[in-house]
Image (cartoon, rainbow, N blue to C red):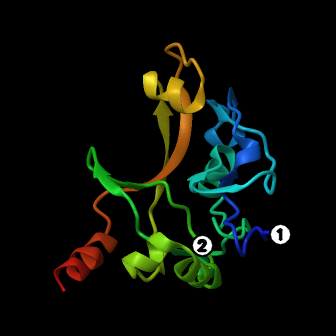
C-alpha cells in the first residue's frame, strides 16, 4: 500500500529514511545552527509522533499546514491548541492547519480523536521562538555531540497571556 503524504501521513512527519542528523545553519531559524536531517519524505516508514526537524521549523516560520505542507492563509488558518505555559509564555510546537486538513487530522490521528478537541481559529499575536537543544539527551536522541554550541531544535509559537486560554479553561470546567 502506498501512503499519500497529506492524506495518510502528515507532511511534517519524519520518515525512517530521514533518521540521520547533523548540525547545520537553518534559514527557518534565522540562519542559526540547527539540527538537520535529510529531506526524503516517503522513504522508509512514517514516524507519526516525530516531526521532521526542518519541516517542523518551516511549518512554524512560514505558517505552513502540518498536514498538507501548503501555506495557510489568514482566513483559513486553524489550530489545535497543544502546548504549555513556561516562563510567562504559553508555547506550542504545533503549526496551523487548513480547516479541511484539521478535519482530516481529527479523524486520522489517534491522539486528536481521543482528545475530542475541535480546532480553533489560529490566535493572533504569536511570536516565533527557538528551542535550543543540548546535553546528554541530544547525544542520545540524535547521536550528535553539541559540545556547548547553541543549536536550535524546534521552533515554537508563543503568546503572552493569550485570550484563547480562557476558552480552554472554560472547556476544562465543563
Residue displayed at 60% across by 25% down: 143
Q: Is residue 29 left or right of residue 127?
A: right
At label 1, counting other C-alpha atoms closer than 10 Å, the crowd grade (few under 14, some 14-19, many 20 or more) is few
Above or below, 137 against 5 in this view is above
Which one is nearer the viewer's eye here, 8 or 162? 8
Residue farthest toward the top in the current orientation of the protein: 147
Q: Is residue 135 visible?
A: no
Where residue 119 sits: x, y (%)? 47, 80
Q: Is residue 17 left or right of residue 28?
A: right
Looking at the rendered structure, the secondary structure element under dot 2 is loop
Where residue 122 sits: x, y (%)? 49, 73
Above or below, 34 against 105 in this view is above
Q: Which residue in the structure is indicated by mark 2? A: 97
2 or 1: tag closer to the N-terminus: 1
Residue at mark 2 to residue at mark 1: CA–CA distance: 24 Å
Location of residue 34 (image quadrant) = top right
Above or below, 135 against 27 in this view is above
Task: Look at discs 2 and 1 and give the one toward the viewer.
Answer: 1
Which one is nearer the viewer's eye here, 117 or 89? 117
Residue farthest toward the left in the current orientation of the protein: 173
Q: Quadrant of the C terminus?
A: bottom left
Q: Quadrant of the N terminus?
A: bottom right
Q: Which residue in the structure is indicated by mark 1? A: 2
At label 2, counting other C-alpha atoms closer than 10 Å, the crowd grade (few under 14, some 14-19, many 20 or more) is many
Residue displayed at 68% across by 31% down: 21
- Marks 2 and 1 in Cβ contact (< 8 Å): no
Amino acid at each position: 500500500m502506498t501512503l499519500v503524504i497529506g492524506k495518510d501521513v502528515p507532511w511534517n512527519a519524519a520518515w525512517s529514511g530521514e533518521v540521520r542528523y547533523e548540525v547545520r545553519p537553518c534559514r527557518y531559524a534565522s540562519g542559526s545552527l540547527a539540527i538537520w536531517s535529510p529531506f526524503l519524505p516517503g522513504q522508509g516508514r512514517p514516524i507519526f509522533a516525530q516531526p521532521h526537524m526542518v519541516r517542523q521549523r518551516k511549518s512554524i516560520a512560514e505558517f505552513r499546514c502540518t498536514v498538507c505542507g501548503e501555506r495557510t492563509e489568514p482566513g483559513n488558518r486553524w489550530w489545535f491548541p497543544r502546548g504549555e505555559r513556561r516562563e510567562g509564555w504559553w508555547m506550542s510546537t504545533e503549526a496551523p492547519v487548513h480547516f479541511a486538513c484539521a478535519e482530516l487530522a481529527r479523524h486520522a490521528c489517534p491522539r486528536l480523536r481521543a482528545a475530542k478537541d475541535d480546532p480553533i481559529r489560529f490566535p493572533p499575536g504569536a511570536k516565533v521562538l527557538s528551542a535550543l537543544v543540548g546535553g546528554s539527551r541530544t547525544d542520545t536522541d540524535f547521536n550528535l555531540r553539541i559540545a556547548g554550541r547553541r543549536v536550535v531544535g524546534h521552533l515554537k509559537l508563543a503568546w503572552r497571556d493569550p485570550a484563547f486560554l480562557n476558552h480552554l479553561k472554560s472547556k476544562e470546567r465543563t
